[in-house]
Image: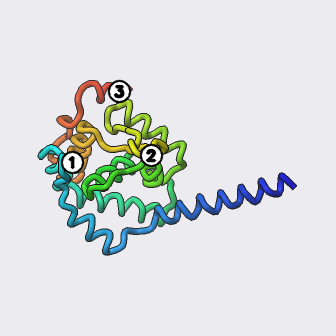
Amino acid sequence: MPSERLERFAAELVALAEQMRQESNIAFSADDERELMRADCRVPGLPATRAQTLARWCELATRLYRFRRQRDRLFGSIFGEPGWDILLDLFIMEAAGKRVPVSSACLASGVSHSTALRQIDEMVRYGLVFRERDEVDKRRTYVWLTDTGLARMGAALEQLSSRGDGDGQEAWDSPLRERLTR
């Protein structure tokens, strides 16, 4: 009897996980896309350069993230770059003036919660994202791009949008380059 209950519970969890996966792959509606595209990106309290970076690359980041979800629907999740998906999501949500709970960032990655959390831990170690507990609800933790993370996302998006004229080296400082090339 207890094993039957466990099996039913496991089946419910699998169904819930599948539903969450499908919902995270739903394409942006036209209304969602318009809302993101008209995001002011000058969120009060942000330094001008931060707001400028968000405003300049918000549309490209949104298109890239949407394309990646559509690609996953066509091919499955064989390409897997959960860290990049998280960074794109954080960029887009900040541009829209929204705070991102860690659980939402995990869903945006398109991989398991534990894999996404490992990616977030790595990004925190590299100084790309910052994590902080909600002051009101201590069970919730938010994550966002650090100034370094935002600058690197801006540089990466600029490289993606260019015709390949630059080599992008200006976007990488020596400590990060050393860690990533080990």
Q: Name the residue under label 3.
A: 179
- Tag 2 secondary structure: loop
Mark 2 or mark 1, which is nearer to you?
2
Q: Quadrant of the N terminus?
A: bottom right
Residue at 34%, 47% (x, y): give it.
Answer: 87
> What's the mark number on residue 137?
2
The tag earlier along the polypeptide, 2 or 1, is: 2
Residue at 38%, 25% (x, y): give it.
Answer: 182
How many numbered marks does the figure carry? 3
Badge 2 vs badge 1, beta-carbon distance below 8 Å: no
Residue 78 drawn at (x, y percent): 50, 54
- Tag 1 secondary structure: helix
Which amino acid lies under the numbered mark 2 shown in the image of this protein? Asp
Q: Is residue 152 above or below residue 15?
A: above
Residue at the far left in the pictured view = 48
Which amino acid lies under the numbered mark 1 shown in the image of this protein? Gln
Whether residue 81 is visible: no
Residue 131 drawn at (x, y percent): 38, 38
Which amino acid lies under the numbered mark 3 shown in the image of this protein? Arg
Which residue is nearer to you in this view: 56 or 50? Answer: 50
Residue at 31%, 55% (x, y): give it.
Answer: 98
- Tag 3 secondary structure: helix
Q: Name the residue under label 1.
A: 159
Crowdedness near tag 2: few (<14), some (14–19) or many (≥20) residues, C-alpha within 10 Å: few
CA gap between label 2 and label 1 equals 39 Å
Quadrant in the picture for residue 153: top left
Whether residue 64 is visible: yes
* Drawn side of residue 17 relative to residue 133, left or right: right
CA gap between label 3 and label 1 equals 21 Å
